[in-house]
Amino acid sequence: MSSDQECTIIVSGGGVATPFLVAKNRVGESELLGSLTRLSNEQGEVLHLPAELDIATVRFMPVADYLRTGDFAPHLIAKPGTLPQLEGLTRPEDNNDAAEKLAWVYNIATKLSLGDLQMLAMEKLRTLYPLSPLQLLVVTKIIVNGSDWDPQGSLMPWIVDHFAEYYFQLMEDHGKQLSRVLQSNDALRMGVHEKLASDPSMGLRGLDG
């Protein structure tokens, strides 16, 4: 990629400014990023991510990978005749780490209005179904607390189904956290309750045996 096709995004976290080299055309996918004032130096154009977005440097790293290359790890593996999977996940802990990372990518993509990155993060997150009950709470809290999260978006049915399936185990093991997450978003709470009302038996997942 030539220098006239690149620019630098500066993310300040913990008092340290970290530069990320990215592709200009992908920066242009975001109305917010595209509206930032661009300064020039000997390395080219530089954009400073607004501090009020409250984006941690470590959380921005996979987003920067996407803005540079169009993808980020963990990568999707799609083989003919099989469901898509994420590369390199061999242990349950790997799935948990990947789920949390993908939730943060979705959160930041929402803040920056990067629709294609939102869809990519969502596609990858769906391969991890089903999440453990505790990880579901962690992931949902990250996503629902994202700036301008759209409760009518295509990720909502996936989250609602998860909560409805594990509802009684969540109540039994993580009741306070479940209550806080559901109370934080009216659409999520109503969706879960409506799902359970239509089929109460689906809330029994995780209680077998």
Image (tube, rainbow, N blue to C red):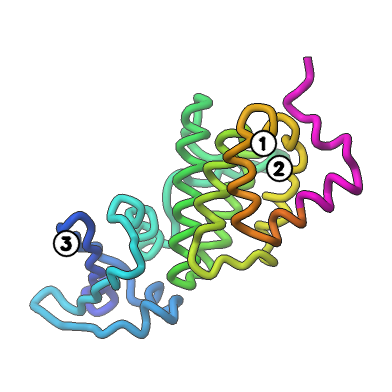
Q: Is residue 20 toward the left or the right of residue 145 in the image?
A: left
Residue hosting label 3:
17
Q: Quadrant of the C terminus?
A: top right
Q: Residue at x 52, y 42 (%)?
A: 138
Q: Secondary structure at mark 1?
A: loop
**Residue at left offset 73%, top offset 26%:** 206
First along the sequence among labels 1 and 2: 1
Q: Quadrant of residue 32?
A: bottom left
Q: CA distance from mark 2 to mark 3?
A: 38 Å
Q: Main secondary structure of the magenta part?
A: helix
Q: Determine whether the residue tagged by mark 2 lies in a helix, strand or loop.
A: helix
The residue furthest top is 209
Location of the N terminus by quadrant is bottom left
Q: Nearer the viewer, mark 1 or mark 2?
A: 2
On screen, residue 77 versus residue 36, left or right, reads: right
Mark pair 3, 1: CA separation: 38 Å
Of the numbered discs 2 and 3, the one sitting upstream in the chain is 3
- Mark 3 and mark 1 lie on one chain; the one further toward the N terminus is 3
Q: Which residue is mark 1?
A: 130
For the residues bearing labels 1 and 2, Cβ distance under 8 angstroms: yes
Q: Which residues are magenta?
A: 192-209
Residue type at numbered disc 1:
Pro
Q: Amino acid at mark 2?
A: His
Disc 1 versus disc 2: distance between alpha carbons? 7 Å
Number of marks? 3
